């Protein structure tokens, strides 16, 4: 039995997908948005950003172990069926 008083209500989003796509296509056709310039600006910003990513086996393994340890502490049992 579901307690309807305690249940949160969920309203579906009122976004009109077709209208959004139509507006995007109309903007592109009218030349309001210069996509080439936008892309070049984004590439320049990303090239100038000081972002380094180091993802290798050790980082993934350590992250997985940390996640398992957190689950173990939270659930008071092993997160893996052993």
Image (cartoon, rainbow, N blue to C red):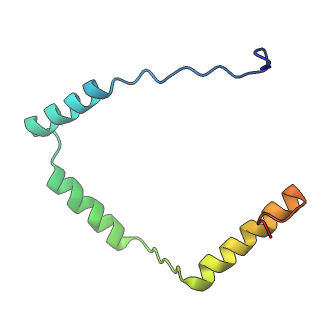
Q: Nearer the viewer, residue 71 or 20?
A: 71
Q: Residue at x 16, y 35 (%)?
A: 25
Q: Position of residue 61 (x, y in %)?
A: 65, 79
Depicted 48 relative to depicted 77: above or below: below
If the image is split into quadrants, where does the N terminus sit? Answer: top right
- Front residue of 79 and 28: 79
Q: Image check: 18 left or right of 25? A: right
What residue appears at the point 80 percent right and 18 percent down from the top-left corner?
Answer: 3
Residue toward you, 3 or 50: 3
Spot the residue most to the right.
76
Q: Is residue 44 left or right of residue 77?
A: left
Query: Does residue 10 appear to the left or right of 47 in the view shown?
Result: right
Residue 39: quadrant of the picture: bottom left
Q: Residue furthest top?
A: 5
The residue at the point 60 percent across, 77 percent down is: 60
For this rendering, which residue is in front, 13 or 45?
13
Q: Which residue is found at the position 14% from the left and 31% from the top?
A: 26
Image mark count: 0
Image position of 52 with respect to 5: above or below: below
Q: Quadrant of residue 14?
A: top left
Residue 24 in the image, given as x and y percentages of width and height: 22, 35
| Among the 4 quarters of the image, the one containing residue 11 | top right
Residue 49 at x, y = what percent?
40, 70
Quadrant including the C terminus: bottom right
Query: Looking at this rendering, what residue extends furthest in the left direction?
Result: 30
């Amino acid at each position: 039995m579901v307690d309807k008083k305690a249940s949160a209500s969920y309203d579906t989003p009122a976004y009109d997908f077709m209208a959004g796509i139509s507006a995007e296509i109309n903007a592109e056709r009218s030349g309001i948005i210069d996509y080439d310039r936008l892309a070049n600006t984004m590439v320049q910003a990303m090239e100038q950003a000081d972002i380094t990513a180091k993802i290798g086996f050790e980082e993934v393994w350590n992250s997985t172990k940390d996640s398992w340890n957190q689950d173990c502490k939270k659930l008071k049992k092993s997160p893996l069926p052993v």
